[in-house]
Amino acid sequence: MTIRLELARTPTFPNGSAARSYVLRLPLGTEGLIDEREYRVHPELATVRRFWPNEPDRHGTLLRTADGWALSYEPGEEDDERIFRLEAHAIRPGGYLTLTEPDGARLPFVVKALAPA
């Protein structure tokens, strides 16, 4: 599935920010949860593109880590953005995911769109 995430309301962005977004391509099961079996078969298909103002777009992959799931753009953990409880959160339009940036900042994102890849 192709998933578009946009920054939800924060103190800095009380109306959220469509300019701070991600497009994920993830294997999801019928309940909207990540399909770990499909991910293990084709991890190279689980991708991310990060759109952020005044920065070049970043392209990366989804990684299964000892602590859960992360978006990674380069080898090593320095740039990883952790996804809070991805294995337990159904991904549906209007739902939320929390990403933790490499500096530890936790940001809420709303699922704006979900479509077959």
Image: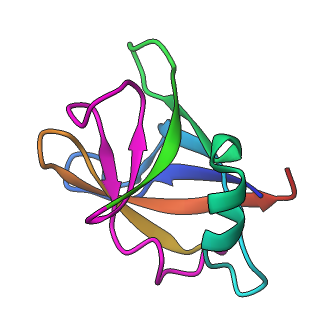
Q: Residue furthest front?
A: 41
Q: x and y percent of residue 109 in the render?
A: 44, 58
The residue segment tinted magenta is 66-92
In this rendered view, identify the residue nearer to me: 55 or 19: 55
Q: What residue do we see at 37% from left, 75% from top?
A: 85
In this rendered view, identify the residue nearer to me: 78 or 104: 78
* Image quadrant in which you'd find residue 106: bottom left
Q: Is residue 12 above or below residue 86?
A: above
Q: Is residue 90 above or below residue 58?
A: below
Q: Main secondary structure of the magenta part?
A: loop
Q: What residue do we see at 24% from left, 44% from top?
A: 101
Q: Quadrant where the N terminus lies?
A: bottom right
Whether residue 69 is visible, yes or no, is yes
Residue 26 lies in the magenta stretch: no
Q: x and y percent of residue 10 in the render?
A: 27, 56
Q: In the image, 9: left or right of 40?
A: left
Q: In the image, 95: left or right of 17?
A: right
Q: Residue furthest left?
A: 103
Whether residue 93 is visible, yes or no, is no
Q: x and y percent of residue 46 in the render?
A: 64, 47
Q: In the image, 79: left or right of 25?
A: left
